Image (tube, grey):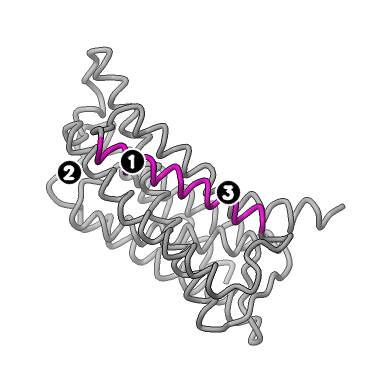
Amino acid sequence: MLILGIITGFLYLACAIWLISNLLNKKIIQDAPHKSILGIAFVALSVHAFISYSSIVAPTPSGLNVSFVNSFSLVAWLVVLLYLIAELRKPVELLGIFIFPIACIAVFLQLIWHDGITLVDRSFELQEHILLSLLAYGLLAIAAGQAILLLIQTHYLKNKQPGGFIRSLPPLQSMETLLFQIIQVGFILLTLALLSGFIFLDNIFAQHLVHKTLLSIIAWLLFAILLWGRWHFGWRGKKAIHFTLGGFIFLMLAYFGSKIVLEIILHKI
């Protein structure tokens, strides 16, 4: 397992280095993804799936081990998967510069940091809630990355410096349209995840879940306001970027922040 994890991590790094190299050489391809990079990434993704399965499902027949490290690795895997699917149709190639290194870190953490076991049962309802939550988180994580690229692009264009990697990006309007397309799908999934939590979980406002629930609701409200503002007032630019990043930060705190406090900080006290 260790050797597989090391190979997977280096494959992810190779993908990131390839993208950075093309970026520096101004060879980013916007019309179609490069088959070699997609092939390497899918190999890494497949091995990553096996590693995560071995850590989350295989050791605990009575439940799923969703500890902090396992959850982080699973989310990273899902983000890579969604990124590769989007890459087949959308100009999101540059996001891989952020995504692949994070996936590499997630794999290495899963190999070297054994943070214990956090079990949840394998009921269909709970698994449905977890899947919807992870899909929403993965898509909105990609939206956050897109917002960061959009922020950089806006800054350089405002200062009349369209050189460098800015020339490799699609037009500003296309970048904004793509951002809102991702947010719309992620928002729908987040809505379904929250609804499934209210329906299927016994007490979604229990002491160990209340922070996660409230932070997720705040994130949902921020994305709802953003989409409403886009529809009614045509919000764009920095306002859209700030709402996107703000919503994602609350979502990140809801999931990983609560896990860090409950499983790592409080567990050690």
Task: Pick whichever, 9 or 253, lies toward us.
Answer: 253
Q: Quarter-wise, where is residue 165 in the image?
A: top left
Q: Which mark is residue 146?
A: 1
Residue at mark 1 to residue at mark 3: CA–CA distance: 22 Å
Q: Which residues are magenta?
A: 210-232
Q: Quarter-wise, where is residue 187 in the image?
A: bottom left
**Residue lying at 28% horizontally and 55% vertically, measured from the top left:** 37
In primary-sequence order, the first of circles 1 and 2 is 2
Q: Is residue 70 left or right of residue 145?
A: right
The residue indicated by pointer 2 is 29
The amino acid marked with disc number 1 is Gln
Mark 1: give few (<14), some (14-19) or many (20+) Cα within 10 Å.
Answer: many
In terms of secondary structure, what is the magenta stretch mainly?
helix
The residue indicated by pointer 3 is 215
The amino acid marked with disc number 3 is Leu
**Residue lying at 48% horizontally and 57% vertically, measured from the top left:** 9
